[in-house]
Amino acid sequence: MNDKNRKLLNIRDTIIIVCIIAVILMCFIIPRLTESTLGEYALITCGGKTAAKLDLDGEGIYTFPEIKGMSFIIDDKRHISVYESDCSDHTCMRTFPISSPGEVIICVPNKVTVEIISELPDENKPDVILR
Amino acid sequence: MKIRHLIEIFITAAAVLAFASCAPEKKVSAQSFVFDTYAQLTVSGIGAKEALKEISESFEDMNGAFELCYGTDALSLPENEIYKSCLEKANALSERYGNGVNVTCGALTELWGISTPEPKVPTDEEITDALSTVIYGTEKFLPGTRLDFGSVAKGYACDEAYSILQDTNTDYAVINLSSTILMYGEKPGGEKFRAGITDPLTGKGYMGIIETDAAFISTSGGYERYFEADGIRYCHILDIKTGRPVETDLSSVTVIVPAETPDGGIMSDFLSTLIFTEGTENIGKWLAYEEFEVVAADVNGKIYTDCGGFIPDEGSGYKYE
């Protein structure tokens, strides 16, 4: 009986099984571990290119060389808004401060967007926000 | 066959399945600034790349055609199938639902200059002059008539996107033009699409979420685009009866049209503006229509809706009428 068992799983088989289990674990577990370390941040783009990723805990006023004529403010409640803008309509400055994933501030004349991003899975998050 | 081989086959099959489930979904995204807003396009399926490219190109073409109308008398415009077709569709909607939304009001839009660096309150005489250039139905353009497709352009564009998606091998898509969206196809697992409606009273968070199958959805409100003069707030939507910014007791109107409805995009865009301009006085009439659903909120936080998939946000303080 013992001889039969020894033939059933030799060293080569064991190595293959271990490798496959390792790959499966990498596929399923590692992405979830990574997700859990990512929080929420404000992604600022200009002309479709990323200009900055701001931690919402970093209270203060921010300017970026890529975005001329605009500044952004993060308040003590982790809300971000446009502080100043030289754009033609100032709609971006009138948009209320944002803090929830999916919320966006848009400055069409300057082609600038500010969006709250969260990599954490959220079943309640809508696919889109109408505004 | 030895038991060991069976085990190997079983493990290999399990590994293949595991890899298959890890394979990235064929989903592509793109962003652009068109139709005076920020467009976010997401398409999934084997033909997603092709569809996204076609949609992006057609949006650029449409955007160019509509921008050309701004500041130019309609009589001087070069022949263009895009704005002619959009004008015809808008006229058909006016005939069916009422002419409170009129794309020939461009002279008025330019006169007020809302969303420009120098908005102003015009004189009564200027308003009367601009109103006299507005035409109805199939009337011919007058000298001074100008076209403003702001109330229907995004819906019209979503209709075009729908046609492209149908002709390409795609599973589902979300075409987000901020105030008008197309939710196309079927999400994996048959999940409903979810669209949040911005709280019009605070301008942030949601007043609720709409859960729906594929649909065109449009929202109109005056809480974001406006200007203030002498303590009065003027919203960007103009009332073509008075020539002045709309005075309404509604703060937000959302219209949901099933995706399979012909020209459903321009219909949702047109109707959300029209219902917004008419206020709560006529809301009962709009809630009675079966071909579309409505979620409206008034300035006191009351919700008027016939939308079965609408879930109000518990913390927002809105109440059903």
Image: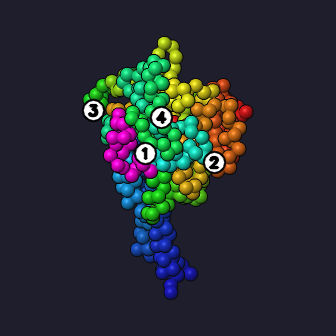
User: Is B38 located above or below residue B46 in the figure?
Assistant: above
Q: CA distance from mark 4 to mark 3?
A: 43 Å
Q: Earlier in the sequence, mark 1 or mark 2?
A: 1
In depth, the one of B110 and B18 nearer the eye is B110
> What residue lies at 42% left-to-right and 48% top-to-bottom?
B84
Main structural element of the magenta stretch: helix, strand or loop?
A: helix
Q: Secondary structure at mark 2?
A: loop
Query: x, y (%) of residue B61?
Result: 35, 49
Query: Along the horizontal axis of the image, is A17 left or right of B94?
Result: left
Which residue matches tag 1? B40
For label 3, the crowd category at 10 Å Cα-Cα, with few meaning under 14, some 14 to 19 and many 20 or more, is some
Q: CA distance from mark 3 to mark 1?
A: 22 Å
Q: Secondary structure at mark 1?
A: strand
Which residue matches tag 3? A66
Q: Which mark is residue B292?
A: 2
Range of residues picked out in magenta: B64-85
Looking at the rendered image, the disc whose residue lies closer to the viewer, 3 or 2, is 2
Which residue matches tag 4? B134
Query: x, y (%) of residue B141?
Result: 42, 40
Q: Secondary structure at mark 3?
A: loop
Q: Amino acid at mark 3?
A: Glu
Q: Amino acid at mark 2?
A: Phe
Badge count: 4
Q: Amino acid at mark 1?
A: Gln
Q: Secondary structure at mark 4?
A: loop
Q: Is residue B203 visible?
A: no
